[in-house]
Amino acid sequence: MPKFSVLTWLVIIVAQITYGLMVYAITRSYYEQRPVVAATPAPSTPVAPHPMPNPNPTGLTPGMGYTPTIEDLKEEDPELIARLADSYFAQKNYSQAIELYERALTIDPKNVETYNDLGLALFYTGQNEQAVDILLAGIQQDGEFQRIRLSLGFILAQIGDKEGAAAAFNKAIELGADNSVGIEAKRMLGEL
C-alpha cells in the first residue's frame, strides 16, 4: 500500500468535502423547485380551525385524483364547476374560486353547499358583508344544512358579532351535536 504525503491527504479531504457540498446543493435545489406530493393520503383528517368547502362532494370519491380544468367547464355542470372552484379555494386563489362558485349558483341556485363555499371565499377576500349575505341566502334555500350555520357562526365571530355567532353555532349544534360539524360548532362556541 502506497504512503501518501500530508499534501496528498489534504487534497483528498478537500475533494471529498467539495463533492459532498455539490451533492447537497444539487439535491436541495431539486427539492426546492418541485412540490412534495404525498403518495398516500393521511390516515385521518384533523378538524380544521375554520370551516372548509366540502372535501368530498357528493358522488366523487377521494381516491379519484381528478381535478377538472377550465376546458372541462364548457359544459354547464354545476358539480364539476364547484369541484374546480374547491380546488382554487384550497390553493387560496379565492378570486377565481368566487367566480366559479357564482357561475355554479347561476346554473343551480338551490345548491346550499355552493352558497356555503362562496360565502367562505368572499370572507377570505375581505368581503365580509357579502359573505354574510350569501350565507343567509343559502340558509333561505335550506335552513337545515348544518355546515352553512357553522360557516356563518365562524364569520360572525371573526367580524365581532359574538351574539350572532353564538346563535349560528347553537343552531348548528341543534341540527346534529354528535357529528363532526356539531362538534366543531361546540368547540367554536366555547371559544367565544
Image: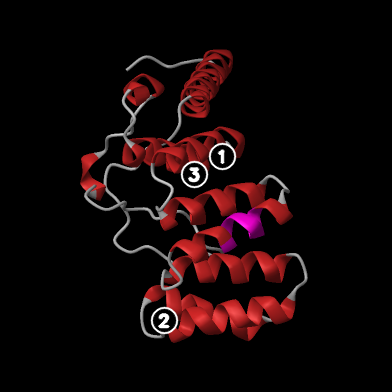
In reply to whether residue 28 is colored magenta, the answer given is no
Give the CA distance from mark 3 to mark 2.
27 Å
Say which element carries label 1: helix
Residue type pointed to by label 2: Leu
- Lower position in the chain sequence, tag 3 or tag 2: 3
Q: Amino acid at mark 3?
A: Ala
Where does the image place residue 24, in percent across and percent down from the top left?
50, 26
| Quadrant for the N terminus in the image | top left
The span from disc 2 to disc 1 (Cα, nearest Å) is 27 Å
Can residue 188 be seen in this snapshot? no
Q: Nearer the viewer, residue 55 or 105?
A: 105
Secondary structure of the residue carrying numbered label 3:
helix
Q: Which residue is mark 1?
A: 98
Find numbered disc 2 in the image and state the secondary structure of the residue it sits on.
Answer: loop
Identity of the residue drawn at 72% across and 48% down? 127
Residue marked by disc 3: 90
Residue plotted at (51% across, 65% down): 140
- Mark 3 Cα shell of 10 Å, populated few (<14), some (14-19), many (≥20): some
Instruction: Tell me whether the residue at label 3 lies in contact with that at label 1, contact meaning CB atoms closer than 8 angstroms.
Output: no
Which residue position is annotated with label 2?
175
Asked if residue 142 is positioned above or below residue 32 in the image, the reply reads below
What residue lies at 51% left-to-right and 23% top-to-bottom?
Answer: 33
Residue range (magenta):
131-136
Give the amino acid at mark 1.
Answer: Ile
Residue at 50 percent of width and 59 percent of height:
138
Q: Are marks 2 and 1 in contact (CB under 8 Å)?
A: no
Residue 43 picture quarter? bottom left
Identify the mark nearer the N-term, 2 or 1.
Answer: 1
